Amino acid sequence: MSRDLRTYRGYGNRRYSRKVMFFISLAISLCVAGIVVGVIIHDWMGQAKAFSPDGYETAAQVGMLTDTKAGDLWDLDSFSYRLNEKPVVSSKEGTANLRIENPPENQQLMRVTLTLADGTQLYRSGLIKPYHYVEHAALSFVPELGSHEATALIEACDSVSGQTLDTVEKSLTLTVL
């Protein structure tokens, strides 16, 4: 009688076991499919994106440039910035020591765009918060070996909306090694 009761409840019943295995397999398949879709859609396993979703520069580090070779600190009434006037570009790595700093006394965010004299854009940062700096930056294009005249467009941006409040241009000499 006890055997009949177990069979009636589904225990030991092949049909019941197959249903359970089917639902377990289905659940595992859905989980795997969800992970695959997430990886494809969100590129979770790809290279790190240059900017965070909110537009802030992800390469920016907290703090200040302490080296005396960091570049001059430019003070424009209520906005200061630091930028290397003679950055060196590594042709192998495609990076430049731009040494961009948004000092802690600023109330504004900062964005920097670097272009060659012919108008080719080499770099555009995300928004850099006060008391943050970018030591080295990956360039989108590496010029040929030698010295090149370039212009850095420094934008002072509103700390809430990110809208550009004012701009200043700075001439640079880029050396590609």
Image (spheres, rainbow, N blue to C red):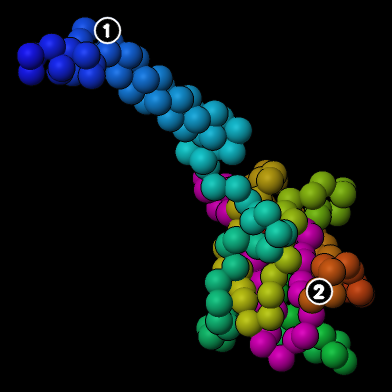
Among the 4 quarters of the image, the one containing residue 62: bottom right
Q: Which residue is drawn at 43% across and 30% down?
A: 31
Q: In this view, does 174 lie above or below 67?
A: above
Residue 55: give x, y in percent of width and height.
72, 59
Tell me the quarter of the picture where residue 71 sits: bottom right
Disc 2 residue type?
Val
Q: Using residue 158 as the reference point, say whether residue 47 is left or right of it.
A: left
Q: Residue at x 82, y 47 (%)?
A: 120
Across and down, in percent, residue 139 comes to 66, 50
> Residue 114: in sight, yes or no?
yes
Q: What stretch is highlighted in magenta?
A: 86-114
Front residue of 72 and 76: 76
Q: Does the magenta stretch include residue 95?
A: yes
Q: Residue at x 69, y 75 (%)?
A: 129
Tell me if I can see residue 177 in this picture: no
Instruction: Return the mark for residue 59.
Output: none
Magenta segment: does it hold 33? no
Residue closest to the far front? 1
Q: Name the residue under label 2.
A: 160
